[in-house]
Image (spheres, grey):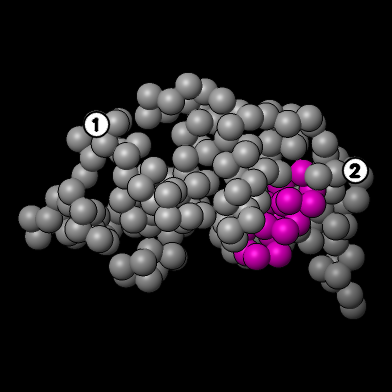
């Protein structure tokens, strides 16, 4: 949800919003455009001037990290993982930051930890731990984590459980889950609870 207009931001969130490093808020494009039309070119949420370069952006993030902001710690982990903002790409450092953010309550960090275990990046590959972290994130409303659980159950052959995960994530707006349900229903892989009874 956008913190300004409080409307839900559609998936892929990154296609419909801007993440502000100054306040760690995800703001919808509509609110950003509306503030720019009013002549405000700073952060639409906290009014902080935009970072002029990578060093300034990194300084903003590190200021939030020093205050134990879980969103900032997760975001810094993302920057290490992808090697952006002038940082050396370091999957192990990213993993450590995600662990810290998860301990402080970041749902996105739980999802990132699940991905790291699934891919074996920054840590030894462990599909069971990946599922554990995705489950923790999904139980707190993380939609892509729920979809990943659906894919994982589908790979195991648990089509009924996979379909349930896809149904939940599709109801929350995840388009790929909806497409997967459509494709599976043609193959007769619907969950038992959703089959028609006469």
| Residue picked out by circle 1 | 53
Q: Is residue 79 magenta?
A: no
Give the side of residue 152 with respect to residue 172, left or right.
Answer: right
Give the side of residue 111 with respect to residue 29, left or right.
Answer: right
Quadrant assignment for the N terminus? bottom left
Give me the C-alpha separation between circle 2 and circle 1. 46 Å
Quadrant assignment for the C terminus? bottom right
Q: Which residues are magenta?
A: 130-148
Task: Report crowding for label 1: few under 14, some 14 to 19, many 20 or more residues within 10 A (C-alpha).
Answer: few
Residue found farthest to the front? 66
Image spot of residue 53 (x, y percent): 24, 31
Image spot of residue 145 (x, y percent): 67, 52
Tell me the SS state at disc 2. helix
Residue 156 image label = 2
The overriding secondary structure of the stretch rendered in magenta is helix
Give the side of residue 17 with respect to residue 170, left or right.
Answer: left
Q: Quadrant of residue 91?
A: top right
Give whichever of 151, 193 is nearer the camera: 151
Point 62% across, 53% down: residue: 102
Tell me the SS state at disc 1. loop
């Amino acid at each position: 949800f956008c913190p300004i207009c409080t409307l839900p931001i559609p998936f892929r969130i990154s296609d419909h919003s801007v993440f502000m490093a100054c306040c760690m808020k995800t703001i919808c494009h509509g609110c950003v455009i509306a503030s720019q039309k009013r002549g405000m070119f700073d952060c639409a949420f906290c009014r902080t001037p935009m970072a002029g370069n990578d060093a300034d952006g990194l300084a903003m993030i590190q200021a939030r990290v020093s205050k134990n902001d879980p969103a900032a710690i997760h975001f810094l982990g993302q920057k290490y993982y992808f090697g952006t903002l002038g940082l050396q790409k370091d999957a192990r450092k990213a993993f450590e930051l995600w662990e810290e953010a998860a301990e402080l309550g970041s749902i996105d960090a739980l999802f990132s930890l699940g991905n790291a275990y699934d891919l074996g990046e920054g840590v030894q590959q462990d599909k069971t731990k990946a599922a554990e972290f995705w489950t923790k994130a999904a139980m707190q409303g993380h939609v892509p984590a729920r979809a990943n659980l659906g894919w994982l159950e589908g790979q195991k052959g648990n089509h009924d459980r996979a379909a349930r995960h896809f149904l939940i994530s599709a109801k929350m707006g995840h388009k790929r889950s909806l497409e997967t349900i459509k494709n599976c229903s043609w193959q007769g892989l619907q969950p038992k609870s959703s089959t028609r009874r006469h």
